Amino acid sequence: TVSEAEAVRRYVSDGDYVSFDFSSFTRGPLSLIREIIRQRRRDIWYCAKFTLLESTLLVAAGACSRIDVGFMGLGDTIGRAVEEGRVKVTEWTNGTLTLRHQAGAMGVPFLPTRALLASDTLEYSGARVVEDPYGGKPVALVPAVNPDVGLVHAHQADIYGNARCFGPGVSPLETAMASRKVIVSADDIIDPDDIRKDPSKTTIPYYVVDAVVHAPFGAYPGGVQGLYEMDFEHFGQYSALERQGRIGEYLDTYVYSVGSHEEMLEKRVGIGRLNELRRRATIREGYR
């Protein structure tokens, strides 16, 4: 395994198209996102499904210039950046972004869907409407995407990159299979023998993974099903700072003033709080 710092240094460059799974609240690769910001990457074009915190932080830090999004909790930080022309946002849906990654993984140029047909996002996205050659009805074609880097946080992984994600998700496998480089962070590193004993639990196979990061509480302040609950109070504090235009203070506290994810947890969160979040994680397989 490698650290977040080494993984980002090796595999994430300025100008990359970066795709991540799942969300700000559940199993998101937040420790990797913070490291991208800490290393001051620039001109990132990123793809997000459910997103709120990480998008705001990337925009506030000046790390990204374009966003493909399925669902975004839009705050003042992103709104101002869009109005001022610093960031371009293209809306899709979580489903159509998954189809784009699936097409990229399959090596086909597009996949058809009935989604988007009644949406004005067609005017701005890369989707196209054609006539179904079999039934004659309109169908939307969404273009394949092959990200430069895919980021996935998993419940478990072995040292080779075989990863397990339990409970509902969006597109961890599609994101990994479509991406040219893949970084998997995991709360727990398990023995490869455990993978071999029950291969049906493997979500992402090792042969598409370039780096494995051992990241306990790697989704913080989000949660991971069955391991720890999201930190509702932390999100409340973040939201208050964002509304007050003080998101820079948040970045200073949780990103720039600490050298790593581990240091952030130790100095800014504390073992007592982390244990409380573990205690709150009563739903093992559900979506919360």
Image (cartoon, rainbow, N blue to C red):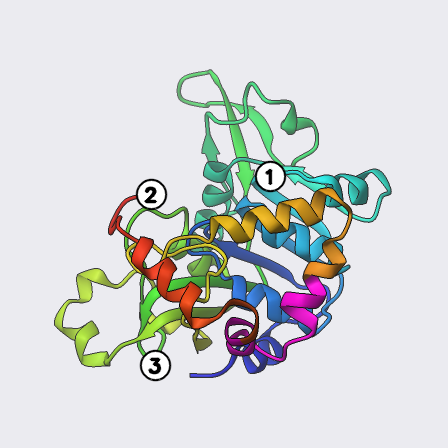
Q: Is residue 165 left or right of residue 268?
A: left
Callout 1 touching callout 3 (CB < 8 Å): no
Return the disc, 3 or 2, that comes first in the chain's sequence. 3
The numbered mark at residue 143 is none
Q: Which residue is mark 1?
A: 73
Residue closest to the far front:
272
Residue under numbered circle 3? 159
Measure the alpha-carbon separation of dots 3 and 2. Answer: 27 Å
257 with respect to 71 (left or right): right
Disc 1 to disc 3, C-alpha distance: 34 Å
What residue would you read off at disc 2?
287
Q: Is residue 57 magenta?
A: no
In front: mark 3 or mark 2? 2
**Residue 20: image location, x then y, percent:** 52, 56
Q: Residue at x 48, y 61 (%)?
A: 220
Span of residues in magenta: 251-266
Which badge, 1 or 3, is on the more N-terminal residue? 1
Cβ–Cβ under 8 Å for marks 2 and 1: no
Q: Amino acid at mark 1?
A: Gly
Of the two numbered discs 2 and 1 on the same chain, state the one appearing first in sequence. 1
Residue 24 appears in view: no
Q: Nearer the viewer, mark 1 or mark 3?
A: 1
Q: Which amino acid lies under the numbered mark 2 shown in the image of this protein?
A: Tyr
**Quadrant of the image for the N terminus?**
bottom left
Q: Quadrant of residue 18?
A: bottom right
Q: Is residue 209 visible?
A: yes
Pinpoint residue 55: horizontal percent, then vertical percent. 64, 51
- Asked which secondary structure carries label 3, the reply is loop
* Horizontal relation, residue 231 to residue 18: left or right: left
